[in-house]
Amino acid sequence: MNGAIMAVYQARAHREGRWWAIDIPSVDAATQARRVTDVEWMARECVALTRDVPEDDVEIDVHFVLPDDARAKWEVSRQKAEAARSEAAEAASLAREVVRAMRADGYTYAETASLLGVSPQRVHQLASAS
């Protein structure tokens, strides 16, 4: 880049058969790529050629368009994964509380493990975890 401010161009890419169709609305241009890994490069080259500027002066922000059903399922999947992480963190916190309370009441690691159905090593981990 030769001291100029790098322009950022928005590109939208979606799959059409075996190709990726790429639209760059701000320069009223379109191109295509064979592989998803080539989308950004092809968009950059297209903008550089259209604007007659060096490719190094062009930055591309690609938005990949997924089929509606895939996007919806992916969002549900992400929400469920986040809920599962939250539930797991809460479960671990409760397990630590139980182990610490039992240890404070005088139960040994072995007794606590036997009563809770886990290994003594796990009881030790829970007792010493923050």
Image (spheres, rainbow, N blue to C red):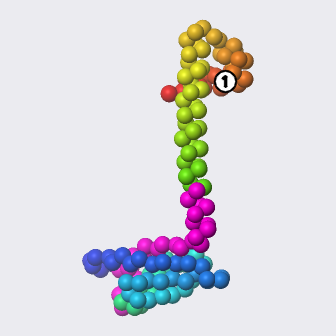
- Within the image, what quadrant is residue 37 found in? bottom right
Give me the residue at 43% from left, 73% from top: 61
> In the image shown, does 99 or 119 lie closer to the viewer?
99
The quarter in which the N terminus is drawn is: bottom left
**Residue 100 drawn at (x, y percent):** 56, 18
Q: Residues within 10 Å of mark 1 (few under 14, many from 20)?
A: few
**Magenta span:** 52-76
The answer to whether residue 120 is visible is: yes
Give me the residue at 65% from left, 82% from top: 18
> In the image shown, does 69 or 116 lie closer to the viewer?
69
**Residue 35 drawn at (x, y percent):** 60, 78
> In the image shown, does 70 or 106 lie closer to the viewer?
70
49 above or below 115?
below
Give me the residue at 65% from left, 83% from top: 17
- Within the image, what quadrant is residue 106 found in? top right
**Residue 113 drawn at (x, y percent):** 69, 19
Residue under numbered circle 1: 121
Give me the residue at 56% from left, 45% from top: 83
**Residue 129 drawn at (x, y percent):** 54, 27
Tag 1: amino acid: Gln
Assign a secondary structure to mark 1: helix
105 above or below 33?
above
| Magenta-colored stretch includes residue 86 | no
**In this figure, what is the number of numbered marks?**
1
